[in-house]
Image (spheres, rainbow, N blue to C red):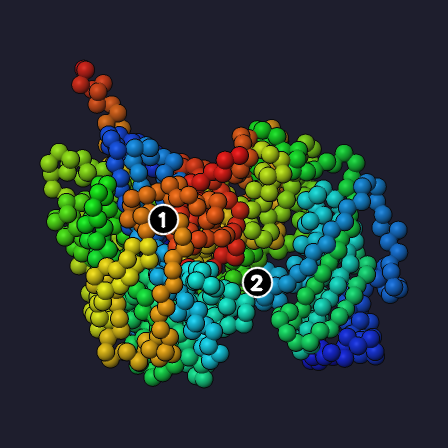
């Protein structure tokens, strides 16, 4: 449905920004996300920044991956645990 | 200078195996989840996720591929536009190979039409100001992620007074389609993996009616392999709750890019640019209030009106079951044409045409030719 | 012939202007004792080496003609040298056919010819014969080159897809997708700050390194158009042996990954012009990789998978899933979906 790629805003000039996608930088239009500032992460689709990417939530999601993975491990060890 | 976040952590890592184990553990009977979004379909295929989940868990592909749901008659309109000598058609690459009833934009270009592949609607506006003697027609396909970018480009054309750019507004809206889907009789559907990037614009609140009124769990999910696995885990946990009497709800796995209310600037821009209208979804039929027409102020940018191109009503190819596949009632493998008469190289139905169509993704990433 | 001139149809007429073009520019830039004879055919007996004779030919069309990391001249020599090298042949001689569109700047032609001469020198091949035609302005993009190549396969070297066996290792000599990404960025005018260079290079030394480190090497290919995925499918189809590749093991440059992510492309389907895929016995794989990594063009070499099972190519994904990896269907187009 919609490819969008996250990048870090390096420069802002009016409604245009330079966004770093990891090794490459592209110009991106900011009119859908007017309060964008340097050092924001933005999600870019079809040449436009469409939403900010929240750093804290990203880190939180990574923590959730670990929790879910650990839940699987607990699920496996529970039957043994109840025997003790 | 700030260091880049390491988005690779969403693509691989030691958690992947644990997430897969968690999925296996949570599936305790036949369960069908639908990924609404075609980009999810491709991501699931590319990461080989179906090979990791139990057979009892069916991952269905929904109607979220814009190319797939664009009616044949509308594709014929774009081909008619490309045939006009004074017209340049600007399109995302996705539309190039889509067969209309007798041709495609790729074939028209080979025959001499001026068809340009662009990566942003803004490129069409730029083309128009560079070539003022030509009419630049942009093919507006996509969902709520893409329509705001086209709206913004149209307003830019207004502001810069570039008169020679117009658009076919073939956009579709996701929530009305989901509400339609849950109303389909005898649907076997336990949860929706909701489209992450559409939700960045419309917000996760948009799915509340589906979860609350139809009782279908919804999880707004990102597109990296670990996001998808985590989204499936969250859905399965909810499905388990619902089966034991709990209420369905909307959860957001993709919280880094989706807020409950979405992107207010983009949403008000959509309101300003378009009026909601009934729309026809290829293979499915008409869905109330699921598409857009240009607002009165922008009607002069409507390509069909400007060029006088009526929409024909060509007959759909025979034997194709794309409609049933997009409604979650059939799988690509159930189609008698799949892999024989209908392949990515020579597609019959819309789901095989687009690289993110469920049949094309199935052919590419799941299908094994019998040898 | 002056550099600020433009090629016209008269340069292909067979008359004095043509004489000026061939002798005053082409033969001058490419000068070597064999070519300097300027007869209707070249006597190449001085270039004959022991071994079996190998011959190949290829035509080169590329837009733009000049791109970061190379140009049509580099490509025309490297492409043909590489086809010989992956067959196990030592390349010795080339022919060069030029089809020039009227309107091409002589300076551009000269620049491409200099690249031909330089790359031939690097690869140790002699341009022995040539032909030039000038055509009306149309859609050749200024210049089309054709090269044919001649090489000799030393005794004892036997390479071919049919020799691939269960359990063999698959090695790649470096990162994939660089060439096509460089062309794409140059052609589409993407506003990209950092340069992405084509990997375009002659691979005679890389091929020789592989053959020295792995005397039992089964097959080599250069994954050009269609990319790594297409080449692996060809190897599997011809050998009747399956191939399984580890996605995480395939080296891809970060910039290439970023560009392909944005456009919705897959680096496994993107053309390379300076890479070799080799299938070698498993116990020789590590030695090959070590040897390759000592070479400038093989720094990122890696074992990426193994042969075995029923025909077809399987990709083991980074999250542990498995899926078929098919050949490229058609040209990849930038997509938003």
Picture coordinates of residue A68, whole percent (x, y): 25, 36
Residue B230 shows in the view: no
> Residue sitting at 46 percent across and 80 percent down?
B86
Residue A76 shows in the view: yes
Q: Quadrant of the N terminus of chain B?
A: bottom left
Q: Nearer the viewer, residue C224 or C196?
A: C224
> Residue sitting at 21 percent across and 63 percent down?
B289
Quick check: B15 left or right of B249?
A: right
Residue named by callout 2 = C68
Tell me if mark 2 has few (under 14), some (14-19) or many (20+) residues whose alpha carbon lies within 10 angstroms of its own: some
Quick check: A40 left or right of C84?
A: left
- For mark 1, name the chain: B
Q: Nearer the viewer, residue B341 or B293?
A: B341
Q: Residue furthest top?
A: A84
Q: Quadrant of residue C285?
A: top right
On screen, residue C17 above or below B360: below
Q: Quadrant of residue C321?
A: top left
Picture coordinates of residue C92, whole percent (x, y): 78, 51
Label 2, secondary structure: give it.
loop
Label 1, secondary structure: give it.
loop
Q: Find the distance from the CA under tag 2 to the CA under tag 1.
A: 47 Å
Tell me if mark 1 has few (under 14), some (14-19) or many (20+) residues whose alpha carbon lies within 10 angstroms of its own: many
Q: Which mark is residue B321?
A: 1
Q: Quadrant of residue C171?
A: top right
On screen, residue A7 above or below C238: below
């Amino acid at each position: 449905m919609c490819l969008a790629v996250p990048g870090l805003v390096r420069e802002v000039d009016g409604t245009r920004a330079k966004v770093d996608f990891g090794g490459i930088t592209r110009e991106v239009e900011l009119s859908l996300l007017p309060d964008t500032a340097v050092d924001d992460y933005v999600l870019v689709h079809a040449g436009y920044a469409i939403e900010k990417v929240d750093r804290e939530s990203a880190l939180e999601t990574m923590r959730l991956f670990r929790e879910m993975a650990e839940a699987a491990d607990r699920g496996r060890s529970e039957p043994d645990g109840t025997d003790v | 200078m700030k260091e880049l976040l390491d988005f690779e952590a969403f693509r691989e890592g030691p958690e992947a195996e644990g997430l897969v184990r968690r999925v296996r553990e949570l599936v305790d009977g036949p369960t069908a989840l639908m990924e609404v979004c075609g980009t999810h379909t491709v991501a699931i295929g590319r990461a080989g996720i179906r090979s990791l989940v139990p057979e009892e868990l069916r991952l269905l592909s929904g109607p979220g591929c814009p190319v797939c749901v664009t009616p044949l008659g509308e594709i014929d309109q774009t081909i008619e536009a490309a045939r006009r000598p004074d017209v340049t058609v600007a399109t995302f690459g996705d539309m190039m190979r889509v067969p209309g009833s007798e041709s495609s934009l790729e074939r028209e270009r080979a025959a001499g039409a001026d068809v340009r592949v662009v990566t942003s609607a803004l490129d069409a506006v730029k083309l128009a100001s560079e070539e003022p003697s030509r009419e630049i027609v942009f093919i507006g396909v996509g969902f709520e992620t893409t329509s705001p970018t086209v709206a913004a480009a149209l307003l830019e054309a207004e502001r810069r007074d570039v008169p020679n750019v117009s658009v076919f507004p073939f956009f579709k809206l996701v929530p009305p389609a989901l509400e339609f889907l849950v109303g389909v009789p005898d649907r076997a559907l336990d949860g929706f993996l909701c489209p992450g990037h559409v939700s960045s614009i419309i917000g996760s609140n948009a799915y509340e009616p589906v979860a609350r009124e139809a009782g279908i769990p919804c999880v707004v999910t990102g597109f990296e392999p670990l996001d998808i696995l985590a989204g499936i885990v969250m859905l399965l946990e909810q499905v388990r709750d619902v089966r034991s009497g709990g209420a369905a709800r909307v959860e957001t796995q993709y919280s880094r890019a989706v807020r409950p209310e979405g992107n207010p600037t983009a949403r008000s821009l959509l309101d300003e640019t378009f009026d909601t209208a009934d729309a026809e979804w290829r293979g499915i039929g008409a869905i109330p209030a699921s598409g857009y027409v240009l607002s009165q102020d922008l009607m002069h940018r409507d390509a069909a009106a400007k060029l006088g191109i009526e929409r024909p009503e060509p007959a759909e190819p025979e034997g194709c079951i794309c409609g049933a596949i997009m409604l979650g009632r059939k799988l690509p493998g159930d189609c008698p044409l799949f892999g024989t008469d209908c392949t990515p190289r020579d597609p019959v139905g819309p789901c095989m045409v687009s690289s993110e169509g469920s049949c094309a993704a199935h052919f590419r990433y799941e299908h094994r030719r019998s040898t | 012939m002056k550099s600020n001139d433009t090629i016209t149809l008269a340069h292909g007429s067979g008359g004095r202007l043509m004489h000026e073009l061939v002798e005053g520019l082409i033969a001058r830039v490419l000068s070597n004792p064999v070519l300097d004879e300027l007869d209707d055919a070249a006597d190449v007996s001085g270039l004959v080496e022991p071994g079996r004779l190998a011959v190949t030919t290829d035509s080169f069309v590329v837009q733009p003609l000049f791109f970061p990391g190379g140009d049509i001249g580099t490509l025309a020599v490297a492409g043909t040298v590489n086809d010989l090298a992956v067959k196990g042949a030592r390349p010795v001689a080339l022919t060069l056919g030029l089809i020039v569109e009227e309107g091409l700047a002589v300076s551009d032609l000269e620049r491409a010819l200099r690249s031909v001469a330089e790359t031939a020198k690097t690869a140790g091949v002699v341009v022995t014969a040539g032909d030039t035609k000038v055509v009306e302005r149309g859609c050749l993009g200024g210049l089309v080159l054709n090269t044919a190549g001649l090489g000799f396969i030393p005794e004892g070297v036997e390479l071919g897809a049919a020799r691939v066996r269960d359990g063999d290792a698959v090695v790649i000599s470096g990162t994939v997708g660089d060439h096509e990404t460089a062309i794409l960025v140059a052609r589409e005018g993407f506003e990209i700050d950092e340069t992405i260079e084509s990997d375009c290079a002659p691979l005679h030394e890389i091929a020789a390194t592989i053959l020295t480190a792995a005397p039992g090497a089964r097959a080599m290919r250069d994954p050009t158009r269609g990319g790594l995925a297409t080449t692996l499918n060809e190897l599997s189809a011809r050998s009747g042996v399956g191939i399984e590749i580890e996605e995480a093991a395939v080296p891809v440059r970060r910039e290439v990954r970023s560009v392909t992510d944005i456009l919705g492309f897959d680096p496994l389907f993107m053309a390379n012009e300076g890479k070799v895929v080799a299938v070698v016995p498993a116990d020789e794989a590590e030695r090959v990789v070590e040897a390759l990594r000592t070479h400038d063009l093989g720094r990122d070499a890696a074992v990426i998978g193994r042969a075995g099972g029923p025909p077809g190519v399987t990709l083991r994904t980074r999250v542990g899933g498995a899926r078929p990896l098919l050949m490229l269907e058609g040209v990849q187009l930038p997509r938003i979906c």
